[in-house]
Structure formats: structure tokens, C-alpha cells
Amino acid sequence: LQDFIIEESLVPMAQHYGIRDDNLLAELHQMRRLLERKKEKGETVSSALELLFMLKPYKDSFADIYKLLRISVTLPVTSVSCERSFSCINLACLSIHAERTKALDVQKIVDSFALNHGNRGIYTLLE
């Protein structure tokens, strides 16, 4: 969360999405004051998602920050979930075509992969 409210890390994202720096900086100033008041009351915000929920009642006052928060919590951090989906699809295809799958020469596939994709640690698995 601390990285999100630092101007240097937020301004490039804001520029990418067409948000003016002066509007963003004004909102950041006010948001920091709001967070300080919340902290004085013993309320803490530890994630971007919590900050998004906290700002929802004030979304008209913090329109640009609210927009950036919504984007940041919905963008995937990595492609792992996509890769996992493709792996599931591949496994489903192998299951559907079980007869063809059983006829495959696994060692031939592994060797072909190793030759075409360089050092991927595959040799350490085989030894």
C-alpha cells in the first residue's frame, strides 16, 4: 500500500491512463490526511483493496485515485492464472484423446522440448 500512495510510483500509471498530475497530487494530499485521521482512530488500511473499499463513499472526491485503485486491483500481477488455465485445457485434451495420449513417446517429447528450448532445467529432472 505504501508504494501505491508514493507519487513517483503512481504518476507514471496516472499518465498512462490520462490522469492529470495536478489533480492526482491534490487527491493524494487529501487522501494522506484522510489516512492519518483513520490511523488516529485506530483504523488501519494495509492493502490497495482495503483502500479501495475505504474510498468508495468518497469516490467522487477521489475520482482519479479511485480509478487507479480499481485498475490496480483488477490487473493481474502475473500471468500464472492464464498459464494455469492453459495447463487445464491441455490436460483435458489429453484426457479426451486418451488413446492417442497413450501412444505418445514421452521421452521423445522431452528430448524435443530440451533441444528446442535451451536450458530450462529439464536435464536435472531427468538425471
Image (cartoon, helix red, strand yellow):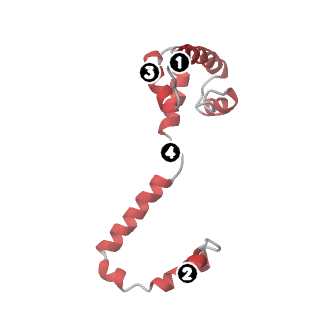
**Which badge, 1 or 3, is on the more N-terminal residue?**
3
Q: Residue at x 55, y 23 (%)?
A: 64
Q: Amino acid at mark 1?
A: Phe
**Which residue carries the number 3 mark?**
56
**Which residue carries the number 1 mark?**
62
Q: CA distance from mark 3 to mark 4?
A: 21 Å
* The C terminus sits in image quarter: bottom right
Q: CA distance from mark 1 to mark 3?
A: 9 Å
Where's residue 107, x and y in %? 49, 85
Graded by Cα atoms within 10 Å as few (under 14), some (14 to 19) or many (20 or more), the crowding at tag 3 reads few
**Which badge, 4 or 2, is on the more N-terminal residue?**
4
- The reply to whether discs 1 and 2 touch (Cβ–Cβ < 8 Å) is no
**Which residue carries the number 2 mark?**
126
Circle 1: element type: loop
Q: Nearer the viewer, residue 14 or 50?
A: 50
Q: Tell whether 69 sits left or right of 8.
A: left
Q: CA distance from mark 4 to mark 2?
A: 33 Å
Residue 76 image label: 4
